[in-house]
Amino acid sequence: MRSFLVASVFVLSWAAAASADIVTWDCDNDGDSAIDCVVTDWSGSSGEYNMTIVGNQFWGPGHMVGTFDTDTTLDPTLNIRNTVDNDCDFDWTGYTVNIYLSQPFTISNVQTYGPAGWSGGITQQGSFWNGMEYLGIVDFTGPTPIPQTTGQIDFGYTISFSGATRYYFTQEMVPVPEPATMGLLGLGLGGLLLRRRRA
């Protein structure tokens, strides 16, 4: 009886600690030229993996899209680190990352490695939306803008997901311009609409 109990405890603790392995993955930018980004590193095993993304962003939003295939429907963990250069024609006062996944997921361990003083927080955990997928949101802000052409944001977060053996993933990166720049963009758009109405 005692050996049965010990065996049962071992099996239960192993099951609780078990995670799926990501056996294949494929991630790349979506080709619309908003962001030119690539995966420069993939590592990990036994249910925990690390993916490093490096890119140059020319406008927003920019998208990294991909798939992950796992060996079971248990919950793998993926640590994603991003380094993105500001090649837009405006400074960034904020940066929003929308994470879309085809199955339920949670976000944790949000980190900001640069610029100095910038920080990030989870605005929304992965929640079902649009009838097809789950959306989570992370927002980054700082005391000083990230300058165009010379600035860079370096950040990371962790996602854990379960429920399938194939997951469809999108990381949508949205730089936030200074309010003055947004006003100028609005004036420019208003001028175009007025010109079109007169014509």
Image: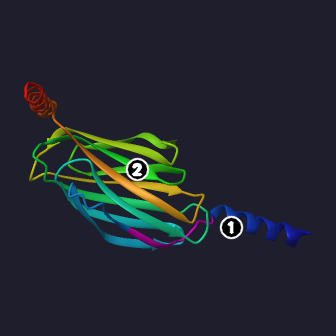
Find numbered disc 2 in the image and state the secondary structure of the residue it sits on. strand
Which residue corresponds to mark 2?
Answer: 99
Q: Residue furthest front?
A: 199
Tell me: 57 left or right of 11: left
Horizontal side of residue 188 vs 167, given as left or right: left
Where residue 165 sits: x, y (%)?
57, 66
Query: Residue beneath label 1, please?
Result: 14
Residue 150 x, y percent position in the rendering: 9, 53
Q: How is the image coloured?
A: rainbow
Q: Sequence-wise, which precedes: disc 2 or disc 1?
A: 1
Is residue 128 found left or right of 177 in the rendered image?
Answer: right
Q: Amino acid at mark 1?
A: Trp
Tell me the quarter of the picture where residue 38 sits.
bottom left
Q: CA distance from mark 2 to mark 1?
A: 30 Å
Indicate the amino acid at tag 2.
Ile
Counting every numbered tag in the picture gives 2
- Point out the image quarter for the C terminus: top left
Residue, x 9% and y 52% (percent of image)? 149
Point out the stretch of residues depicted in magenta.
18-26
Residue 198, placed above or below residue 165: above
Tell me the crowding category of disc 1: few under 14, some 14 to 19, or many 20 or more residues within 10 angstroms, Cα based: few
Question: Residue 29: image x %, image y %?
Answer: 29, 62
Label at residue 53: none
- Horizontally, residue 196 falls left or right of residue 171, namely left
Q: Is residue 129 magenta?
A: no
Residue 20 among magenta residues: yes
The spot of residue 101 in percent (x, y) is: 47, 53
